[in-house]
Amino acid sequence: MGKIVAFANQKGGVGKTTTCVNLASYVAAMGKKVLVVDLDPQGSATSGLGIDKTKDLKTIYDLISGDTAIDEVIKPTRLEALDVIPSTVDLAGAEIEMVHMPQREKIVKGILDNVKEKYDFIMIDCPPSLGLITVNALTACNSVIIPMLCEYYSLIGITQLMNTIRLIKFHLNPTIDVEGVVMTMKDNRSNLTKQVSDEILKFFGKKVYFTYIPRNIRLAEAPSHGEPILIYEPDSKGAESYLSLAEEFLNRNKVSYETITKGTKIKLREVKNNG
């Protein structure tokens, strides 16, 4: 049965989608069956995995509305073991509709319960807010990965996020836990970066991943090509970091995996007319 991991931080621009997409991609390339669930109306994970949003696309919104079956919504990506439930701007209106639905905090959980046995990991990209959609993700998941910039403002909002997780644990999902914290866009030349990193380590302790993600232009370019970094530029510093993070993530979960080294042939599939 698949472990469900939500990627959450109410602050935008912290590398949340980048981390979700690239960690999921490497875990899939290392032999695990992975589903990415795009719960952000911006649909960045959707386009970053090569799904054409300009076409008549069935999305997570259709599942929340109850208008379609989940098998009609799941899309294959170029990576052989990686699928995605896409999202578009339509999802922005879903929160208003969900307010009047029964068990409104557990709608996404009900959707994912239908497919979690088919995957080793289900990774949810949350929107940059703590609204009802994020509450649904936190209610559905087993654990949370928190990507954080090594900047002062990142520390300000973390108390609010942790308080939300505590409330979810008490009222809706007693098994939820923080999987880990990933420091993103880290610049080791900055004194402020070191100070903020020290504060993050002090607050989260062993939950902080040893692997950090540096600022890297290739990581920024990859989404515009609809490719995760291991396809777009597998020899870049960003790719090396996400490979290391995937190894650390799987080791922490005590899961065996196929080792990827330089020159490893990644299993790709032809995906035609993906939309």
Image: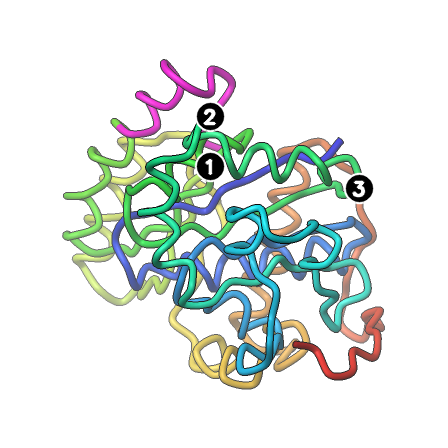
- Horizontal side of 183 relative to 235 (left or right) equals left
Of label 3 and label 2, which has the lower sequence position?
3
Magenta-colored stretch includes residue 178: yes
Element type at marker 2?
A: strand
- Which kind of residue does numbered mark 2 sit on? Asp
Q: Nearer the viewer, residue 249 or 240?
A: 249
Measure the C-alpha gap from mark 1 to mark 2.
Answer: 6 Å
Q: Residue at x 39, y 41 (%)?
A: 98
When the figure is inspected, residue 14 is found, relative to residue 118, above or below; the finding is below
In the image, 107 versus 214, the foreground residue is 107
Mark number, residue 144: 1
- Say if 144 sits above or below 32 in the image: above
Q: Residue at x 61, y 43 (%)?
A: 249
The boundaries of the magenta stretch are 164-179
Q: How many residues crowd around disc 2 within 10 Å: few (fewer than 14), some, or many (20 or more)?
A: some
122 falls in the magenta region: no
* Residue 105 picture location, percent across and down: 42, 31
Foreground: 250 or 144?
A: 144
Question: Which residue carries the number 2 mark?
Answer: 177
245 left or right of 138 in image: right
Numbered disc in front, either 3 or 2: 3
- What sort of colour scheme is used for the picture? rainbow
Report the side of 127 relative to 245 (left or right): left
What residue is pinned by disc 3?
118
Secondary structure state at the residue bearing disc 3: helix
Disc 3 from disc 2: Cα separation: 23 Å
Where 80 falls versus 176 (above or below)?
below
Q: Label 3 crowding class (10 Å Cα cut-off): few <14, some 14-19, many 20+? A: few
Q: Residue 35, position in %: x, y? A: 67, 52
